Image (cartoon, grey):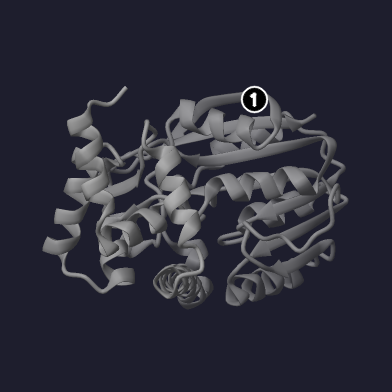
Amino acid sequence: MQSIAETTRCLKALGDETRLRILHLLSQGELSVSELMEILNLGQSRTSTHLNLLKEVGLVKDRRAGRRSFYSLAPGAAQGLLEEILADQEGSPEFVADLAGLEALARRRREEARSYFDRVAATFGEQALPGRTWEGFARAALRLVPRARYVDLGVGDGLLTLLLAEVAEEVTAVDHSAEMLSALRARAKRRGIENIVTTQAPIEELPHADASFDVALLSQALHHADTPSKALHEAQRVLVPGGRLIVLDLLAHGEEWVREQLHDRHLGFTEAALEELLEDAGFTSVKVERAARDPQPPHFMTLLAIGTKA
């Protein structure tokens, strides 16, 4: 139970329009300081001051990721009161404008990532990218029944898609970049491969019907997703009961440069975090292991995760 002094400080913290707007935005999900600054059109000093005060009274918590700080709502005794206050102001012009700003931010991030992949599509297969490892995929492929309907979510250079097409009944290649898919179709045509179907869409919003595929593959794509959990839920939805999921992604690392140069949204995942993401998405018999280590510095490690739709 909070003391009277603690309760008073919490109520004072809630008695500010900007802090309420910050709390409303954080109720939608975790955000960085720079993202809050952009949405609210505030300077760094003011934004940090408000966040520090909210942290002091236990309304928000933070975590460090390299040089960036991310904030989210903190569980606690004041959550019920906060939810009631935010719900009462849900239709206010300020909250509506902030949600529009949040959506604009997410849309801009998607466009920037799409533009990046469109630009590099023609030479993508020749780039040295962290976590690209044939060893990792081979270890996963050995555990699968080859003749099946595959969906490759986030095709990248398309090399794995082309490999799958040689043994699959059909492969549906999904990517948000039209240029990436165009390059894949050109490569497939040159090789005489005709069982690849392409779909331009975010991997978090698949246009396919439930239970459409036997196997879903996410190879070095999950760390590009705005919301990895949503991408995994979508993969689970489009799989048939008993369908298999394969995830190849990076072990958590501290190479911040990939955010700017490669448009990575996340710096990999720990084994425990990746296992929890798959289980929360509804997959059973989940196994996560380290598959391979890149020979070149900074020696990215690839994780292999496999799960089954119940």
Is residue 1 visible in this depiction of the protein? Answer: yes
Element at badge 1? strand
Q: Residue at x 30, y 55 (%)?
A: 32
- Location of residue 128 with respect to 146 vertically, above or below: below
Q: Work out which residue is located at the far front of the displayed protein and give it.
A: 4
In the image, 188 versus 230, the foreground residue is 230
Q: Position of residue 227 (x, y in %)?
A: 52, 52
Could you say which quadrant of the image residue 179 lies in? Answer: bottom right
- The three-letter amino acid code for the residue at tag 1 is Val
Q: Is residue 225 left or right of residue 68?
A: right
Name the image quarter holding the C terminus.
top right
In the image, 279 versus 91, the foreground residue is 91
In the image, 256 versus 302, the foreground residue is 256
Could you say which quadrant of the image residue 109 lies in? Answer: bottom left
Q: Which residue is mark 1?
A: 286
Q: Position of residue 72 (x, y in %)?
A: 36, 45
Q: Is residue 123 left or right of residue 281?
A: left
Mark 1 surroundings within 10 Å by alpha-carbon count, few (fewer than 14), some (14 through 19), many (20 or more): some
Q: Is residue 43 left or right of residue 226?
A: left
Q: Position of residue 256 (x, y in %)?
A: 27, 51
Name the image quarter holding the N terminus.
top left
